[in-house]
Image (cartoon, rainbow, N blue to C red):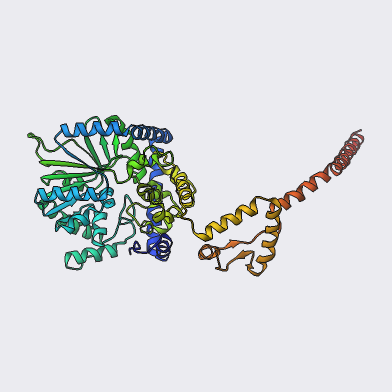
């Protein structure tokens, strides 16, 4: 089911939590991916050194992004590529449509691209009467379901074989068996026809090599190779931060990305594309366009809180590690990017804390995302910065403001704090059962829907500490007497033993 039409993340999360299949599917898959990543990184060895090397490459590149972007563009154009710049999602969609119209295209086949999801390319093409077909199996499934991806790497993580069989049966016009081989066979046959008939192939870009003007694609199904070789025109949508300086740097990324994403030592297909078809090439597009998309990315440059956000290599490891994502899946986040990276990326790119502030609150701030990230992006710190900006911009609810003022008043005085605890212990008697509070009232309503609130202890820590301090102060005299008594007993036993020996 799609939950993206609900107004806020709490409502979307509530729907997801009540979907037993979704929760179990997401839990099992993310656990499998986490375990695979753990084994693959251990097998590689010196994983923390690889992470640090990847982080340094990304930090250096983003710090000099203007230089490497210019170098990439110059080399790509020298290779015969038409390079375009899109300031926002609307411009990216317009450029794509203009290229398609110029080529008089009737159909476009697409390999997996999160940027195309971000800028809503499918909708833009379909609005002009151009058919747009996803060729990644997971993306094809959610396109038929009219949904957004639920995971960066596994878009249809939330669907089972029966649900997929129903979608594909409608497309086939006949009932298909839910067997994997049957479903995959139908999609393979269907898409092969689309590949051969398409006028334009569209790809994303995992990495762009500045020194040669090349783009690099990582995939496991081979569809990106079909998309980039069969149609006569290729369009590549590229986030402006996807640059790395050299092919040597790609070795590090090719080590980090597949291991972090799916636990593979290497991705099945890694394609380097340097311009359109040359005269002696047997395949490839006759015309190649690269659309470099900003869409809020440049707003992070120079921002001490969020510049490292541009280091992301879109592996999805933070989703698999996040305890919130593992319970509610991706649609609860309300956008194409989900999990910790989505919770930061959407409001940061748009500088729209007011609209997306609830996503920043959908986190435990446990730091598991940072530990999983192959380039060490401190997403948990960024979530705190987003919450801070929400407060600074005056978007906090009135109840939250009042609560924080009350908290400040109580915690600024140990006497007020002690009295508040005493009042709390007295007041909770009417709410406590079996030493927990189960009632769903006031601020406890949401919390107690899925767990219980522990009651205040009979003694506060300060009171326990005072009692222990008093005991310690009384102990030395008693302790000396006890030691003296034990010593006399030991001497008496020794003396008795000596007498017996004689």
Q: Point out residue 357 in the picture as x, y percentages from the top left corner.
A: 43, 54
Q: Position of residue 29 (x, y in %)?
A: 37, 54
In this rendering, is residue 192 above or below 490? below
Query: In the image, what residue occupies the spot 13% across and 38% down?
Result: 276
Which quadrant of the structure image shows residue 302? top left
User: Is any atom of residue 318 visible in this view?
Assistant: yes
Quadrant housing residue 125: bottom left
**Marker count (numbered):** 0
Q: Could you tell me which residue is drawn at 22 percent across and 53 percent down?
A: 121
Q: Is residue 171 left or right of residue 491?
A: left
In the picture as drawn, the residue positioned furthest to the front comes out as 394
Residue 214, relative to residue 385: is it above or below? above
State the quadrant of the C terminus.
Answer: top right
Q: Residue at x 22, y 31 (%)?
A: 212
The reply to whether residue 264 is visible in this rendering is no
Instruction: Tell me if 235 is positioned left or right of 243 in this view.
Output: left
Observer-nearest of 128 and 75: 128
Is residue 123 found left or right of 41 in the rendered image? Answer: left
Image quadrant holding the N terminus, namely: bottom left
The vertical placement of 195 against 211, above or below, is below
Tell me if residue 175 comes above or below residue 254 in the rendering: below
User: In the image, is 11 to the left or to the right of 246?
Assistant: right
- Percent x, y for residue 149? 31, 55
Percent across and percent down for residue 32 are 38, 51
């Amino acid at each position: 089911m799609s939950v993206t039409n609900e107004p806020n993340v709490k409502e979307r999360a509530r729907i997801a939590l009540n979907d037993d299949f979704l929760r179990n599917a997401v839990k099992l898959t993310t656990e499998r991916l986490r375990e695979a990543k753990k084994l693959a990184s251990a097998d590689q060895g010196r994983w923390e050194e690889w992470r640090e090397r990847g982080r340094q490459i990304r930090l250096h590149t983003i710090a000099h992004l203007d230089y490497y972007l210019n170098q990439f563009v110059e080399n790509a154009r020298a290779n015969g590529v038409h390079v375009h710049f899109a300031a926002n999602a609307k411009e990216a969609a317009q450029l794509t449509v203009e290229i398609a119209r110029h080529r008089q295209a009737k159909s476009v086949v697409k390999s997996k691209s999160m940027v195309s999801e971000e800028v809503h390319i499918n909708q833009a093409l379909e609005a002009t009467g151009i058919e747009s077909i996803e060729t990644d199996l997971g993306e094809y499934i959610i396109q038929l379901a009219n949904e957004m991806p639920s995971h960066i790497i596994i878009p249809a993580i939330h669907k089972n074989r029966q649900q997929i069989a129903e979608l594909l049966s409608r497309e086939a016009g006949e009932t298909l068996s839910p067997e994997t081989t049957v479903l995959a066979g139908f999609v393979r046959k269907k898409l092969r026809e689309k590949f051969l008939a398409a006028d334009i192939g569209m790809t994303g870009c995992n990495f762009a090599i500045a020194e040669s003007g090349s783009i690099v694609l990582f995939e496991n199904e081979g569809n990106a190779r079909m998309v980039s070789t069969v149609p006569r025109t290729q369009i590549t949508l590229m986030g402006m931060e996807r640059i790395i300086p050299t092919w040597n740097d790609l070795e590090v990324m090719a080590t980090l990305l597949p291991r972090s994403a799916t636990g593979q030592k290497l991705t099945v297909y890694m394609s380097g594309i340097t311009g359109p078809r040359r005269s002696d090439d047997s395949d490839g597009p006759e015309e190649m366009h690269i659309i470099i998309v900003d869409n809020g990315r440049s707003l992070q440059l120079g921002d001490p809180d969020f510049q490292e956000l541009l280091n992301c290599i879109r592996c999805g490891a933070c989703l698999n590690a996040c305890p919130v994502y593992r319970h509610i899946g991706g649609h609860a986040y309300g956008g194409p990017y989900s999990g910790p990276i989505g919770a930061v990326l959407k409001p940061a790119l748009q500088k729209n804390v007011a609209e997306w502030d609830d996503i920043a609150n959908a986190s435990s701030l446990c730091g598991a995302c940072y530990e999983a990230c192959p380039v060490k992006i401190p997403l948990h710190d960024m979530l705190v910065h987003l919450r801070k900006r929400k407060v600074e911009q005056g978007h906090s609810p009135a109840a939250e403001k009042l609560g924080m003022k009350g908290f400040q008043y109580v915690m600024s005085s140990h006497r007020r704090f002690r009295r508040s605890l005493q009042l709390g212990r007295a007041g909770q008697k009417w709410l406590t059962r079996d030493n927990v509070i189960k009632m769903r009232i006031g601020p406890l309503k949401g919390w107690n829907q899925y767990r219980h609130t522990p009651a205040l202890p009979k003694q506060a820590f300060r009171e326990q500490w005072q009692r222990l301090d008093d005991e310690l102060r009384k102990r030395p005299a008693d302790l000396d007497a006890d030691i003296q008594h034990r010593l006399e007993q030991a001497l008496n036993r020794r003396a008795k033993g000596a007498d017996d020996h004689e």
